[in-house]
Amino acid sequence: MPVSAQTEQATGRTAVSRLARPFVAIPVVWRRQILIWLVLFAALLFPLYHNNDADIDAMANAAAYATLALGLNIVVGFAGLLDLGYAAFFAIGAYAYGVLSSFQLEPPWSPFWAPFQYLGLVAQIPGDGNAMVVHFTLSFWLALPFAAALAAGCGVAFGLPTLRLRGDYLAIVTLGFGEIVPIVVRNWSDLTNGAAGLNGVAAPHLFGWSFGVNATPYYYVSIALVALLVFVSTRLRDSRIGRAWMAIREDEIAAGAMGVNRTNYKLLAFAIGAAFAGMTGVFYVAKLQTATPEMFGFPVSVMILVMIVFGGIGSIWGAVVGAFVLQLLQSWWLEDLTGWLNSLGVLIGNNWLAHIDLVPSIELIFGIILVFMMLFRRQGLIPAYKPSEALTFEQQSAQVRLGGFEDLKLSGLGGDVRTGALALEIRGVTVKFGGLVALNAVDIDVPSGGVVAVIGPNGSGKSTLFNAITALVPADGGSIRFHGEEILGLPDYQILHKGIARTFQNIRLFPNLTVLQNLLIGEHARLRTGPFSAVIRPPGTRAEEKAATTWAMEILSIFGNRLVPRANQAVSGLSYANRRRTEIARALASRPRLLLLDEPTAGMNPAETLELAGQIRGLKKLGLTVLLIEHKLDVVTTLADTVYVLDHGEVIAQGRPDEVRRNEEVLRAYLGRNVQAAHAGEAVGAANVA
Amino acid sequence: MTFSDLLLQQTINGLSLGAMYALLALGFTLVYGILELINFAHFNVFMIGSFVAMFTLQSFGLSGQSVVLTGLPLVGVLVAAFIVTMLFSGGLGVVIERLSLRPLRNVKGPAAMITTIGVSYILFNIVLLTVGADSKNFPNPLPPIKFQIRGAVLDMRVLLIWVVAVVLMAGLWAFVQRSKMGKAMRATAQDAEAARMMGVEVDKVIIMAFFLGSALAGAGGMIFGLYYNFTSFIIGFTAGLRAFTAAVLGGIGNVPGAMVGGVIIGLVEAYAGQFIAAAWADVIIFSILVLVLVFKPAGLFGRMAPSKS
Amino acid sequence: MITRRIAGQLLAATAAVAVANKVGGASAEQVVKVGINLPLTGADAESAVRIQHAIQLAFEDANASDAVPGFRFEAVSFDDGTATAGQYDPAQAATNARKMVSDPQIVAAVGPQMSGSGKAMSPILSEGDLAIITPSSTNPDITNPKFASQYRPAGKAIYFRTVTTDAFQGPNMANYMADNLHIKTIYILDDSGAYGVGIADAFQQQIGKKGVKVLGRDRLDPKAADYNAVLTKIKSLNPDAIYYGGVGQAGVKLAKQAYDIMPKVIKAGGDGVMSPELLTAAGFPAAQGWYATQAAPHVAGDNKAAQFVAHYKGKYGQSPDDYSITAYDAGLVIVDAAKRLVAEKKQINKSNMRDAIQTAKVPTIQGTVMFDENGDIKDRTVSVYQVNKDMTKPLDDVSAQYNYIGVAPQS
């Protein structure tokens, strides 16, 4: 299975490569690379063939905004956290360098500063009067990582209390933060020189040569920053980290259930986004050699957001292109365009055209762009997701081949089975929603290696039981032990780490991601890659990614040829049954010891139901323990060793399937409900029981 | 001026501000309650409301501070101006919903919110490019009557703000609680799908929410003009942001919460100006917002409807 | 130069030029391009446009009167306001400075409106040896010799001002309020902007030295509407006066609300409150009694300013503000510099223009403009005005509604 080639193909067909039609003969994998190198080459040569200092400067400003857009893209595009105060981190980076490289702070000299002087961070200069004072001379190159770290730290400090807020609340809180930072900068004038703006920020030096006011060296630094951040963004996106972010963005609850520590990953996105902005701030203030609080207000945050929306939310090259187009539009092209229109007006004698000035309408134009993009091209100029490639006719019409377990290794699935030991031991678990008791002192045993089914009428508390086990709802009492270890009270992502994976009654996949990506997110807890190795990609990480993909494809092959050809399709386009299968596969990808299946065959036709039942039996043979919620009693009968019947939150019966089927209380619970339900015209569960 | 008089005066100041924020906050909350959408266009519907009110009053021959009306003419002119302003702003809200938000009704994610930011930019710049950037003298037909309460002064205009705000909010509350449309709105806020199945015309409910919210914003804009005797293209942002903070503080989607939140923010602003410094007012307001959300994520009074995540 | 002489000649000159153009043809004239850098979009657009009009007017008048025979002035506008910043954007100002420097036809510049932009532009202009004359940016840092290596790395002054810096206007007014108005206590406000904070800081420093008790200092958010809280607090402190450093945006609201809350307290500001906006948007009675200063001598009996106002209004249909006058004067300085270069048979280029501007001695609306070696205007006279409603004149006419009181004492 040439998986890597397929994933390359998956990311390769975007608007950019559409421009590259002439290259059609070139292998798909290379087209994108060639284009990127061409763009980079053109960018490097730009100052040579376009020898205009002002335009080079405008390009450098645009590049600075591109780096900001890349940072916000990580926060908004990857992790789905709406940040409306992003410019605050830009300000923090800018002022960090501005203050530490200018004459703003001049504390009296003391021996304390001597080691810093040795390191070249400060200098001793005569101040007002005769006393010596400290002059901060932080180098631009040191300031870049320093400001990045400082901004990231501020991002974490601000994010810790606020990131658990729901999206819209987060938006407004970040907006508030974005308002606060410039106010603090303005009012704290001892540190920042307030509204008057910083004086004498040092220009960067390289090997003793000062950049001065020549735009070209700044331009090259900015291009290098963009290249670096594009690289970092791409590496992060295509890694365990990026997948975790996208999982959070697509479905927070499912992400938690798949072992993603949401708080940590949100903080990480916030911190990395802030770090990008902090670095950009250093560059920006070094180029301008001044900074005022007005440079970092709400309009800046909104404009960066507009850039990524315009380019395509979540799309790395989209962020870059969006920033360049919008920034150059206002600083360069709109003036030219006005000039051309005016000349055209003079030429054709149109007075209105001869005097039109587009420049003052720039904000209006941006507003219109924003609305039109949202209404007519939400995916932006360069969409982050290509439409799934259609299956070939052969693939579509291929005869269904059921999966089997004979030729599968599936090493490590299920873990060691000690017969007789209890995998899951639920004792006296109670869950209340306000006054409603959803589960009342429920006791359930799941033996290791067994299949236990939970049945009961709608609203009897079955899904609540699953939610209590996986920590989606807090229990009001009781104990849940997993292989002897208490798991009640653990956060949701820890449950998966322990080895319990689940599916959801109403399917909670990550809809914009592919089948394969969904499975890789399932493996999240079993992989080790951190942000640094994701970027650097050492051999260990490469091997891990390769193994992860191999494992995911193995899991997919459980379902024969139903999912394997669709591995690189977005799950939102799959059939209902295939989405159910994908969700089970995603749970299996996490190498669980206990699998919780919530109505796995719901919505499947009898043939598909039978097929899935067979596959679940296969899993059991491999030693996987399964806890199952199911309405279809024939499925329960064929699969389960033990059946628990829930009604009104209590266990009313338990035993072997055939015993339970004859239990009078069970019949009353089902049929009694059905008799009443029949009057209300609702006969959903009846067929299944009968 | 004794300390207690000072406190009383600042409380009067804060309550006037709060009444205005509350009117604006109601618009945010109505729309959010039903669509879960932060409507940034609301900021500038408020701003445009104040301009519509200004032009309406000017069309009655009022300009600047020169003409003072009393008795029936005053009431007549004010009521007429309020009706025109509210109808215009309400209509503007409906147009915004119809043209830019309805096509995005079923789109997940921030698309709709970003659209409202775009609409907000458009409204803002249309006003800027047509009427100009300088502040405008808003007509003030109210007689300069001041009541002395111990050391504090209560201006006639303050009373007007309070009366109008209370009448409008009480009217809204009665509408939401009593009328059929109000019930439909509450049902839609709880569960739009279920409401649709029970025969509620969700489109109508949403249009109604936009109309009412925008009309209240327009009324807020007119009150703003009458109170401060000035308006400008820029008034929407700060007032809107504080009003939105008020809505979140009270529990967004929650109508009484928006009113209480507005009053709290108004009082905080006034007391901050007195006891700390006006320079830090925004910092204090947003810090309170963060603290409240951290400890009570659903706001002081909680959401009216359960989250539809 | 709209003196009486020129104004009188205006009509005749226009006709003459029109004839000359027809005879000699436009191609015979050399173009002197002057760059204008102002935030023409965003929050400051309104006052920026007032400045822009004044500069254009200066050159149109010069062209019409054929002030420099054989040369025609052309103003090229650059916008340093961006949608990204929502107002003036120093980054865009720096780009514009580069545009001006790299255009060989641009030999002088006017602007910027804001000191923040000036700080970003100044080093670039210094390297390009392009002189810029600001009609309104008053932050003293840019021309402060202490920061010379930063703001004029090439050495020579390039940042000239037809307006005095905060370092004089604030302190002189402080002297005036202490010595002439005999205030004992004061409360100081600013509007968060660079100009407002700067002038209020300088005022505060000096008024403290004069033994006046500063009861407090606070900062208004120009975008907020309600200053009642801080004004109530000020009222309870019962000061003799309040001083406001800032421009019209917050000033209008402040004037209105301060009038409601404490109508009798003395209120004063800098040149930022000497604007038609205060008269129209705050209006009477709120504006009545406000003190304002102007960083130029008032010439008694001379109605140059009134003529300028009438001329400007006739052309653009709006009232000029104080910075329109300094902007027009900046234009006059440039025209004069070019004229002298032509007289001396020197080439009109960036360096020569800079040198000529440095040695300017030009009669303007605000008096004779000369610059010191840092580029600051030499005449540091600060005139004090007070709003006094004159029903016989248009209520938005600054020259009619602001009464000249006297010169503020220098420190």
Image (cartoon, coloured by chain):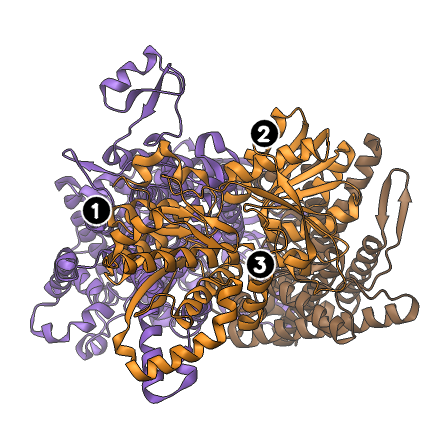
Chain colours: A purple, B brown, C orange
The one of A144 and A394 positioned closer to us in this rendering: A144
Mark in the foreground, 2 or 3: 3
Above or below for C89 versus C241: below
Residue shown at 25%/57% (left/top)? C349
Residue B208 lies in quadrant: bottom right
The residue most toward the top is A111
- CA distance separating discs 2 and 3: 30 Å
Q: Chain of mark 1?
A: A
Please, what is the three-letter code of the amino acid marked with disc 2? Gln
Return the x and y of residue C17 as percentages of the image width and height: 38, 77
The numbered dot on residue C305 is: 3
Residue A615 at least partly seen: no
Return the x and y of residue A397 as percentages of the image width and height: 22, 78
Left/right placement of residue A365 relative to residue B238 reads left
Above or below for A190 versus B262: above
Q: Secondary structure at mark 2?
A: helix
Quadrant location of the C terminus of chain C? Answer: top right
Mark in the foreground, 2 or 1: 2
- CA distance separating discs 3 and 1: 50 Å
Please, what is the three-letter code of the amino acid marked with disc 3? Ala
Give the crowd class for mark 2: few <14, some 14-19, many >=20 residues within 10 Å. Answer: many
Residue shown at 72%/52% (left/top)? C287
The numbered dot on residue C206 is: 2
Return the x and y of residue A532 as percentages of the image width and height: 24, 39
Which one is earlier in the sequence, the residue at label 2 or at label 3? Answer: 2
* Label 1 sits on residue: A221
Q: Secondary structure at mark 1?
A: helix
Please, what is the three-letter code of the amino acid marked with disc 1? Val
